Amino acid sequence: MSRFNQRGARPSATSPVRTTGEHTTTHEGGTGHLRDARSELFLLAVSNFVGVDTFYEKGGRRDERYTHLVQRLAVEDPAWAAGLLTWLRGEAHMRTAALVGAAEFTAARLRHQAPGHSRQVIDSVLQRADEPGEFLAHWTAHHGRALPKPVKRGLADAVRRLYTERALLRYDTDSKGYRFGDVLNLVHPAPAPDKPWQGALFKHSIDRRMNRGDDIPEQLTTLRARARLMAVPVADRRALLRGADAPAVLRAAGMTWEALAGWLQGPLDAAAWEAVIPSMGLMALCRNLRNFDRAGVGDEVAETVVRKIADPEQVARSRMFPFRFWAAHRHALSLRWGHALDRALNASLAHVPALDGRTLILVDRSPSMFPGLPYSTPHTSDIPLAEQAAVFGAALATRAAAPTLVEFGMRSRTVDVPKGGSVLRLIDAFGRIDGTDVPSAVRRHYAGHSRVVIVTDEQTRPGWLPSNCGSHGGMAETEIDDLVPKNVPVYMWNMAGYKEGAMPSGTRGRHTFGGLTDQAFGAIPLLESGRDATWPWETRA
């Protein structure tokens, strides 16, 4: 009888997040699995909003663990750590963790007198014009006021890319500890050769910081347009916004919706929103749908907003997390945005594959998933991990050929997945369940599925099975790994980046992913075709 060459046999493939074989316990007392340093750092980095407490880990302790891992790998494996940090700020859209990581990477290499990498890493993680100042604030607070050459050069490279007139108007405010002029005085960047106006901008930024920037150079046309707009008497400003050329006037002056509210010295009415909406980016539009409804923005302008939100190219350029579209849907007052947000959410989940066979999808809805991570909006709100998990679980279920979608805590229940249904509507069907027991959910719902996907923070209680021995009333502890046949892949989606994992990972059909975007879903068909998965910034063979 053939033992290996059987129908349905899967080729063995490996994935990069790997456990070491060492055991610990999860925060809820289940068997935990420790990961190697690269794997631990990766999972922490892609979920670490610096300074934010999670259910089981205070922000300060979490930040210390992150700093220690970055500094260790900056010396032991600098090329890998540099790749992680560059990818973290780019495809993974993690701003503060990447910035802090670059600073600690550089500090560790300077301490060990290790040349190379630091300048390039600093430059790569600074992707917005306020970030050189943010980096300097972190560096001086943790490493002193002296700026080593790699820091100065990395900052200078970024400044040449990022500093523009519009950036100056948006980010160079009195609330900042390091203004544009401060950064320029500290790193002394030469203007970019292909930007003839940048020398004038650098000089004006320094003059502005010293309160002597009243005379704006002629080549800085956006700044001059803003100055003309600011000179309009307050009493005449709302009338200006009712003119047909108001959108063009605001755009020429680099006026954001936040700046417009200050300029008007009062709330934005429908005319104000309709004038500034053509200049707004996708993220700003999604954050303000509720405000558009409250102000009574007309249907014609609303249609332009809807078209922009539903445009897949706009979604891709915005680099918004998928759950931000769910947040916009949750806070909107009107139904007129619903279909566009559903399309935008689907576009942001373009990497979620349509899986064949039967797929068991388990979504954690326990209390530890609900404290959440901040969703940065002007409103006081947040999108907890549970809702982020629901977004990914629902997206996977709506695309799978034969899904079994389950929400679980200590108890579990199946969630109906209608054919052709909306991801946004499916997320609405989830509830909240006390406790965390992943093994019990697997044991109850696994029934010969082709694969199992678990979206969770991994902090599970022990799973118990009846036994003739043991000290728990005839019950013996069991693990996820024991409940699913070894030839059936299990994919653990780690949402919180805790140190302790709930199952082995990296080989034998057991794989762990992480992050708040859809990128890692692409590894599932790759692994099932027998190809090894690599770190997301590395080229797959």
Image (cartoon, rainbow, N blue to C red):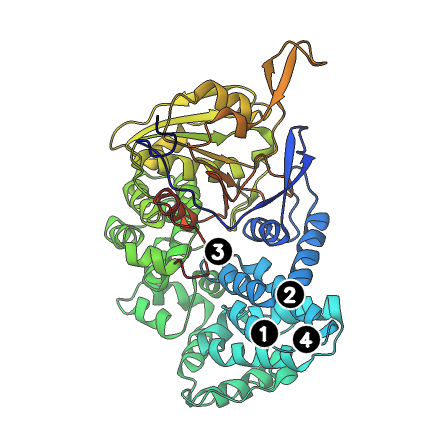
Q: Are marks 1 and 2 in contact (CB under 8 Å)?
A: yes
Mark closest to the chain's N terminus, 4 or 2:
2
Residue drawn at x 48%, y 75% as measured from the top left: 162
- The residue carrying mark 3 is 535
User: Is any part of residue 216 visible from this angle?
Assistant: no
Above or below, comparing residue 71 to residue 464 in the picture: below
Marks 1 and 4 sit apart, C-alpha to C-alpha, by: 9 Å
User: Which amino acid is tagged 4?
Assistant: Ala
Mark 4, secondary structure of its residue: loop
Q: Are marks 4 and 2 in contact (CB under 8 Å)?
A: yes
- The residue carrying mark 4 is 114
Residue 143 in the image: state x and y as whole percent. Answer: 74, 70
Mark closest to the chain's N terminus, 1 or 2:
2
Residue 209 in the image: state x and y as whole percent. Answer: 62, 80
Mark closest to the chain's N terminus, 3 or 1:
1
Marks 3 and 2 sit apart, C-alpha to C-alpha, by: 17 Å
Q: Quadrant of the C terminus?
A: bottom left
